Image (spheres, rainbow, N blue to C red):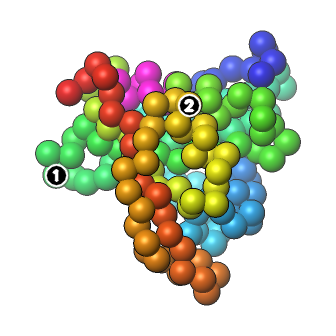
Amino acid sequence: MAADTRVVPMTADHAAQVLAIYQAGIDEGNATFETAAPTWQTFDAAKLAEHRFVALDRTDRVLGWIAASRVSDRCAYAGVVEHSVYVHPDARGLGVAGRLLRALITSTEEAGIWTIQSGVFPENTASLALHARTGFRVIGTRERIGRHHGVWRDVLLIERRSPSVG
């Protein structure tokens, strides 16, 4: 990744680009069960403000984003979040997602969060490889968990347990 690329907290100023990257991932068919990106208001309300970041190039173009949300309001799950990471198709293979994941890991550990989890389609081999490189492991397969464009899909549940929190 270029030295002038930086990871910064996501703000409303990034909304249009973040949602466009999200829609590009949706359109490719192996990133999510969603069929359309939400409004910024819905996205903003669902994601934890202190655990969402964008990677910007030198012109402030968003190359990718990462965000986390609570998995439950129950106090027993206070240290568990679910995340999503998306990279603009033109910026893939440049290390953007890895830098975003490292920023999320840092922010969550500083906040006392001990588990980051996500669900990934088995066909999304690039995402699985990225997550494995950053300390995630597959903990199970949710077989035929949902229909996507009329086809039953499996989802691999992945997690990263913090070695320093917990």
Q: Is residue 105 magenta?
A: yes
Residue displayed at 64% across by 60% down: 123
Is 100 drawn above or below residue 155 in the view shown?
Answer: above
Q: Position of residue 51 (x, y in %)?
A: 45, 34
Q: Nearer the viewer, mark 2 or mark 1?
A: 2
Chain part drawn in magenta: 103-109
Is 154 drawn above or below residue 107 in the view shown?
Answer: below
Residue displayed at 70% across by 57% down: 25
Q: Is the residue marked by circle 1 packed among few (<14), some (14-19), or many (20+) residues within 10 Å?
A: few
Predominant secondary structure, magenta span: helix
What is the tally of numbered marks visible in this picture? 2
The quarter of the displayed image where residue 149 is located: bottom right
Residue 15 shown left or right of residue 9 in the figure: right
> Label 2 vs label 1: CA separation?
30 Å
Three-letter code, disc 1: Arg
**CB atoms at circles 2 and 1 under 8 Å apart?**
no
Name the secondary structure under disc 1: loop
Can residue 116 be seen here? The reply is yes
Q: Quadrant of the N terminus?
A: top right
Residue bearing mark 2: 133
The quarter of the displayed image where residue 22 is located: bottom right
Name the secondary structure under disc 2: helix
Residue displayed at 78% across by 13% down: 3
Q: Nearer the viewer, residue 103 or 46?
A: 103
Three-letter code, disc 2: Arg
Q: Position of residue 38 (x, y in %)?
A: 58, 63
Residue displayed at 69% across by 20% down: 6
Residue bearing mark 1: 74
Q: Is residue 127 magenta?
A: no
Image mark for residue 123: none
